[in-house]
Image (cartoon, rainbow, N blue to C red):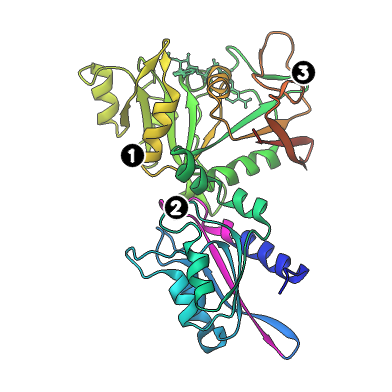
Amino acid sequence: MAVTDFDRRMMAAAIRYSYRHLGRTGTNPSVSTLIVQTAGDVPVIVGRGLTALGGRPHAETQAIAEAGDLARGATAYVSLEPCAHHGSTPPCAEGLIRAGIARVVSGTTDPDPRVSGRGYAMLRDAGVVVEEDVLADQARRALAGYLTRRVANRPHISLKLALSRDAKIGRRGAGQVAITGAQSGAMTHIARAASDAILVGIGTVLEDNPSLTCRLPGLENRSPIRVVLDRTLRLPMDSALVRSAVDVPLIVATTTDPDDERYRQLLGAGCRMMACDENAGKIALPEMMDDLAGQGVSTVIVEGGAAVASSFLEAGLVDRVDLYEGPVTIGPDGVDAPVTPARMAKDFTLAGTSQFGDDLLRIYERTG
Ligand SMILES: NC(=O)c1ccc[n+]([C@@H]2O[C@H](COP(=O)([O-])OP(=O)(O)OC[C@H]3O[C@@H](n4cnc5c(N)ncnc54)[C@H](OP(=O)(O)O)[C@@H]3O)[C@@H](O)[C@H]2O)c1
């Protein structure tokens, strides 16, 4: 049986649904399952499942439970290949077989060596029809953090910058310069809510004194871990970051010795100190990203500033760039944007644009 337009519609719905728990499923991916049963000529969603908060139970288990007997002979739409190994729960592929699912339509293959291809094989061996890679690009985008961490052993890294019309990102000594409007601000906070970590350099902290929390009504408890790159611990004790460190985790990435007085003060204020390697007078980013992945961080948003953004780009560590362009002009004394639409590295392609009020968002994805 070939993949139909209806299959693609259902897969698109499943992928959209999977975004609901993004950033909230621990080291497990946020996966979704929709079970569709056809009664007469009418297809009906009889079971829905989403990786639960913290990562267990898996999406398939919940969808099967909701569908009950109606799962028999139905099609299951799964955004990721069902697992095939016995972990703390039995394999989801086995659960689908036992429930009598006749056909599985999958978004993308799981690169986990315990699963990869085996989930599909287990299903086919039991007579279940399997369609692979349906809307695979969209499924991979939704699972980017999990896939990058599995394949590259580091988090998926998005660089987010707000650019003025004259390609500046701020003005020295002026604090936080308003470049974009309220709608772009809300989008930024939505992205924070779905991310595991948000990272800036100490230059941005000293200039802007940001909180880096998610402050959208109803999503206040969805702030990611904040990370600041601060080799020599210039982070002020009265900064918004340190003052909120007890409530929202703050990692201070540093090369400073733990015996240092400021190190102890920051630790006492609730900061998590992260010992980093140094490379050419800067924090060594690849090693640091490895360490973050080891702590279960799958997605990082780099929110500046200029020096940190350049370092991540030069190290080849950026997977996606979100450039918001606002209507303001900053002038020649502004801080030059490290990257602009006209100066985008050739291994990035424009993946989409959106308009938010007066601001234009351009999203670039790494293709190379
Ligand atoms: N429009 C926007 O989207 C946006 C966003 C954020 C910031 N900004 C603006 O950007 C400006 C600040 O940019 P900035 O370049 O001065 O500061 P920055 O990039 O935020 O921080 C740079 C500092 O981070 C530390 N660092 C540690 N490891 C590093 C590494 N591997 N690579 C680079 N830096 C590393 C260094 O200080 P140590 O050596 O002391 O550790 C370095 O001086 C402000 O004007 C701010 O308003 C704009």
Q: CA distance from mark 3 to mark 2?
A: 45 Å
Q: Which mark is residue 111?
A: none
Kindly indicate the quadrant of the structure image that contains residue 127: bottom right
Task: Sort mark 3 into few (<14), some (14-19) or many (20+) by Cα contacts within 10 Å.
Answer: some
Type of amino acid under label 3: Asp
Question: For numbered disc 1, what is the local secondary structure?
Answer: loop
Q: Is mark 2 within 8 Å of ligand 1?
A: no
Query: Across the whole image, how many numbered discs are drawn on residues?
Result: 3
Quarter containing the N terminus? bottom right
Residue for badge 2? 112
**Is 42 rendered above or below residue 348?**
below
Question: For numbered disc 3, what is the local secondary structure?
Answer: loop
48 and 252: which is toward the camera: 48
Question: Which of the marked residues, 3 or 2, is nearer the chain's N terminus?
Answer: 2
Q: Residue furthest bottom?
A: 40
Residue for badge 3? 166
Q: Position of residue 125 (x, y in %)?
A: 50, 74
Write the residue at 35% across / 68% down: 89
Examine the rendering and report whether any part of residue 50 can be seen.
no
Question: Which of the marked residues, 2 or 1, is nearer the chain's N terminus?
Answer: 2
Task: Sort mark 2 into few (<14), some (14-19) or many (20+) by Cα contacts within 10 Å.
Answer: few
Q: CA distance from mark 1 to mark 3?
A: 39 Å
Residue for badge 1? 246
